[in-house]
Structure formats: C-alpha cells, structure tokens
Image (cartoon, helix red, strand yellow):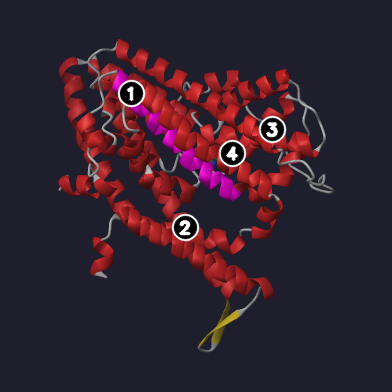
Amino acid sequence: MSKISSMGLTTRIMIGMVLGILVGSIFQDILAGEDDYLIPLGLFSLPIKAFFVDGIFHIGGEIFISSLKMLVVPLVFVSLVCGTCSLSDPKKLGRLGGKSIGLYLLTTAIAITVAISLALLFSPGEGVPLPTNNVYDEKVAPSLASVIIAMFPTNPFEAMAKGNMLQVIVFALLFGVAMALSGKAGNRVATVFEDLNTVILKLVTLLMNIAPYGVFFLMAKLFTTIDIDLIAKLAQYFLVVVAALLIHAFINYSVLLKIFTGLSPVKFLTKMKHACLFGFSTSSSSATMPITLETATKKLGASNSVASFTIPLGATINMDGTAIMQGVATVFIAQVYGIDLSVTDYLTVILTATLASVGTAGVPGVGLIMLAMVLNQVGLPVEGISIIIGVDRLLDMTRTAVNITGDCMVTCVVAKSEGELDETVFNDPNAAKDLEDYHKSLD
Ligand code: ASP
C-alpha cells in the first residue's frame, strides 16, 4: 500500500488507466454473449452490466469529471483576476491578447494543413462503402459574429453559473484592471484574491489524489462499450488522424517552440505527460484546465499573469487536435462520396476549420458538431459524419491531449517573449514533479 502511495502521481494515473482498459475489455468480452449475466449475491443476483458498468464505473467516472469541472470557473476567475491586477503595464494586456490569439490561429492553420496533406497522401476514404441508412442529426454551428458578441456578459454571475468561459475571461480581465486602478481598496481586495487562489490550488491537490481512481472508472466504462471492430473497419481513417496528431504534437510544436524561444522541446514534451493523461482520459480540455494551468506555471515556469490568461483562452479557442480531425474527416468524406474538392475548397476548409476551432467548446465530441459547419462550407454531405462517429471517442481523447499541449506551447512562447518565463523552472526536470511537491510546499 505504502509502495503505491510513494509512487509518483503520473505513474499512479497511468496504472489506473491501464487497469481500467484491461477491466473494461474483460467486461466487454463477458458481456458480448449474454447481456444480463448475473452475479450471485447471497439471496439476490445482480446483472453485471447494471452493477458495474452503469453503476460503479459510471458513477465513479462522472463524479471525477464533475469535480474537475467544479474547479474550472473559480480557478480561472480567481487566478485571472490575480494575474491581471499584478500586470505592471496595462498595455501588456493588449499585447498578450494579440500574441496569443495570433499564435493560436497560426498553430491551428498549420495543424489542419498537415492533416489535409496526410489525408490526400494516404486516401483513407477510398474503397469505403457509402453509408446506407445512416442518419446524422445535424446541429447548427454558431456564426463567428455571434461568438464574438457572446463574449461580453450581460450578467457575470449567469456567465459563471453557465460556465461560459469566454464571458468569465472578459469579466475577470475587466475586474482585475479595475482592481489595479483602485489604489488601496484594490490592494486590499487583491490580498483576498491571492489567499483565495492558494485555497483553490489546495482543492486541486485534494482532487488530484482521486485522479487514478477517476481515470480507472472512466477507462473501464469506455472500454466496456467501445467498438473495436468498427475501428478496425475504419483503420485507415483512424491511423491517418492519429499520425497527423502525433506529427503536430511532436514535430510542429517542437519546431515552433525552438524557433520562437530556443527552449528544449524534449523538456517541454516530457513535462506535458501529466496534463496529457488528464486530457486523454477526460476528453475535455475544459475539465483539464486546472491541471493545464498548474503545468504551465509550476512545471514550465510561465508567470501566473501570462498563463492565467493564455490557458483558459486556449482551452476555449485553441483546438489544433480538433482541427486535425476535421481536416482528415473532410477529405475522407469527400473520397467516400466520390466528390472532388478543388484547391479553393481546401483553402476554405483550412480557414473554416481554423475559425470553427474558436467556437468549439472544450468538451467531449464538440469537434464533430463543428465539422458539420466545415462540410457545409464546401458542399459535402453532412450525413458523412455518421460514418466516423463510431470511432470518434478514442480520437477525441487523443486530440484533446494535443489541444492541451498546444495551449501550453503557446503559453511558453508568449511568456518568453514578455520576459515572464522562469527558465530555471522550465529546465529543472524535477520542478513540481507530479505537481505534488509544489502542493506539499503550500502546507
Ligand atoms: N474534446 C475536445 C476538447 O475538449 C473538443 C473536441 O474535439 O471535440 O478539447
């Protein structure tokens, strides 16, 4: 027991994940024959599916996700207010905004270009039969204008209650600036916010201790229901998306980080392990935000004033992994339906998917909804989504890890350019190892 608790958190989460995958796969096998296999319990017997899969696994996983989400609004609001009011130069805010939005759009455009090129090279849609009676229930994607207008809250409490992150960001920025301009009163409020920040970070620590169990439940439930046969049938599509995600995460981010900052990509990627595990198992960059923020500040060395702005913004508007799936999916669907796309169409796809990623919320499966908007732009049948929907969950997990890595890469670049990156922390392989040492130091 003590051996387990002395292991690093990342190792424990990894063990939880592997065990969850194993247990889920075993359950899938057991349930394959008889759906209502009964476990004898004294005088009673319980259906295995109801008890384990829809019971324990489901409840455990949902509690874990809800607890993570519970922290997002208070954490973002408090840390962003602290970050903004500690900015010495108000002009810096505009610079931070410009640089991060510019870099987020640039990395997304690169991501989707790689995805389309790879899909054209390997033609994953060739030979795939047309869907017969598949129906996809199309949802309407919001327009860019409405996304921009909706950034401004009419009621900040409503924005927080609904978890509307862009509105929370805008309110926190204005509140922080006003605090900085309010002299002594502002300073008194700032002390309260600093203390609140420490308390919320403590809450993050408490939650991280249950992460290995939470990840176990999520994986066990998922792998009981995942359709491996379907993945095998769409293996080419699946592999092209995964290859593009890996190229973007390992090559593109490394090159960009090196060019813009001169920092070591290997150190960067090593430090992303922990946050990526969270992103992978939750499939939500929004729910992972508490961990991403801590990784950016305590492990990568970005200052709180930069990271508390760039990370929530990135988790809301920067979805490189999602854009990659959309790029491959567009080419794939065009090939399945035998529709030729022109160069202009591809450029439209790059532009639309880049903008779509701004409107994609960091929650599971939203990337597919936004894909409808991309397909519409180039006149492809939206029902094509029904072919890939069955294999999307595993891809969603992988692309969420990439989305988070992109947020942290841009944070490092912006922080470095503002002189707000502590390179001693970045270069220290043991900095906040598993984030636990840091949390212990709060005691
Ligand atoms: N699950 C992704 C995220 O939260 C969004 C998506 O691609 O559906 O980052």
Instruction: Give the side of residue 64 with respect to residue 246, left or right.
Output: left
Q: Which residue is mark 2?
A: 61
Q: CA distance from mark 2 to mark 4?
A: 20 Å
Q: Earlier in the sequence, mark 2 or mark 4?
A: 2
Q: Residue at x 23, y 29 (%)?
A: 423
Amino acid marked by disc 1: Thr
Q: Residues within 10 Å of mark 4 (few under 14, many from 20)?
A: some
Q: Is residue 247 above or below residue 190?
A: below
Q: Classify mark 4: helix, strand or loop.
A: helix
Q: Quadrant of residue 63?
A: bottom left
Q: Do the residues under discs 2 and 4 have CB atoms within 8 angstroms?
A: no
Q: Classify mark 2: helix, strand or loop.
A: helix
Residue 366 image label: 4
Q: CA distance from mark 2 to mark 3?
A: 38 Å
Amino acid marked by disc 2: Gly
Residue 261 image label: 1
Q: Residue at x 36, y 34 (%)?
A: 265
Q: Quadrant of residue 71?
A: top left
The magenta stretch is 393-417
Q: Residue at x 21, y 26 (%)?
A: 189
Q: Look at the numbered disc 1 and say if its residue's Cβ is closer than 8 Å to ligand 1.
A: no
- Residue 269 x/y as whole percent: 37, 39
- Residue 62 x/y as whole percent: 48, 55
Q: CA distance from mark 3 to mark 1?
A: 32 Å
Query: For the N terminus, which image quadrant?
Result: bottom left
Q: Which residue is mark 3?
A: 120
Amino acid marked by disc 3: Leu
Q: Classify mark 1: helix, strand or loop.
A: helix
